[in-house]
Image (cartoon, grey):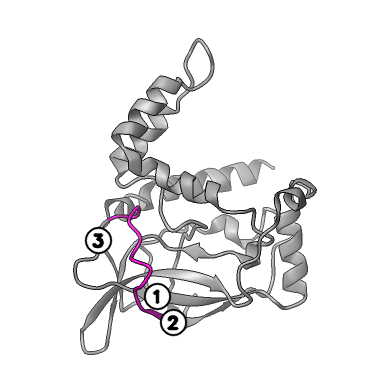
Amino acid sequence: NLPKGEVWQMGNISAPVFGAATPEQFLGRLESLMPDPDTKKPNPEKVKAFADANPEVLLQGKYLASQPVPASYGAVNYWGVHAFGFVSAKGKKQFGKWIFEPVGGTQALTDDEAKAKGPDFLIDELRQRVAAGTVAFDFNLQLAEAGDKLDSAVAPLPDDRKKVTLGRLTIKSVAPDATGACLAITYNPLVLPKGVEAGADPMLTARAAPYAVSLGRRLTEGAKQ
């Protein structure tokens, strides 16, 4: 929630790329992973054939597989993956992709440390960090330049692009369970404040409808509990 009644919703992830370039590609990937009626498992030949024809669907998984397990939800980067245009009071528009970077830097676990942790250690650790008042992220915008690809969530901007800090996000509380305030948020990335505009990314424009369905299901399931 922002001043003057404006709202800015986001759905950031801990990878610089999304899992597909277009809604059609995303659907095809899901269909390729559907279990075979006989084996009850995905058909490896079907999975490979689709991935070979659509290598973009492997980028996110390859990135995550190359990274160690984070030590904390508060010590890992979060990317918006889509390009947005930021419009000045004079009407000048600058496109960029944002990233929330932990003020204290990223922290990771060794394989042995990760194996020794319980299944809920990340949320438990986050509650401890927040109680100590040590969870904050710089809201950085990586500025696009002429020729950069702005219509794809699987094409990050070059690493050498300039960054500017737009603000700082401080986490002050964490819900005690899964029924907190986040349950009723759609995380629709098209809910934007004045001066911020969506880019021409087909995956970005496709997210609103399924997110609304997801919200309805969460609220319905929550009411049953």
Q: Which SS does the magenta portion mostly show?
A: loop
**Residue 130 against residue 217 in the figure, above or below:** below
Q: Are marks 2 and 3 in contact (CB under 8 Å)?
A: no
Q: What mark, if any, has residue 76 been given in the picture?
A: none
> Looking at the picture, how far across and down is residue 124, in whole percent?
76, 58
**Residue 37 against residue 5 in the figure, above or below:** above
Residue placed at 54% from the left, 46% from the top? 65
> Looking at the picture, how far across and down is residue 4, in whole percent?
43, 83
Question: Circle 2 is placed at which residue position?
Answer: 166
Disc nearest the viewer among 2 and 3: 3
Q: What mark, if any, has residue 149 been given in the picture?
A: 3
Question: Circle 1 is placed at which residue position?
Answer: 141
Please name whichever residue, 185 or 83, is drawn nearer the observer in this view of the structure: 83
The numbered mark, 2 or 3, whose residue comes first in the sequence reads: 3
Which image quadrant: the C terminus?
A: top right
Looking at the rendered structure, the secondary structure element under dot 3 is: loop
> Looking at the picture, how far across and down is residue 39, in whole percent?
53, 13
Q: How many angstroms separate mark 3 from mark 1 (CA)?
A: 16 Å
Looking at the rendered structure, the secondary structure element under dot 1 is: strand
Q: Residue furthest top?
A: 38
> Looking at the picture, how far across and down is residue 130, in whole percent?
72, 72
The numbered mark, 3 or 1, whose residue comes first in the sequence reads: 1
Specify the amino acid type for callout 1. Leu
The numbered mark, 1 or 2, whose residue comes first in the sequence reads: 1
Q: Does the magenta segment cover residue 159?
A: yes
Q: Are marks 1 and 2 in contact (CB under 8 Å)?
A: yes
Residue stretch rendered in magenta on the structure: 152-164
Q: Residue furthest bottom?
A: 90
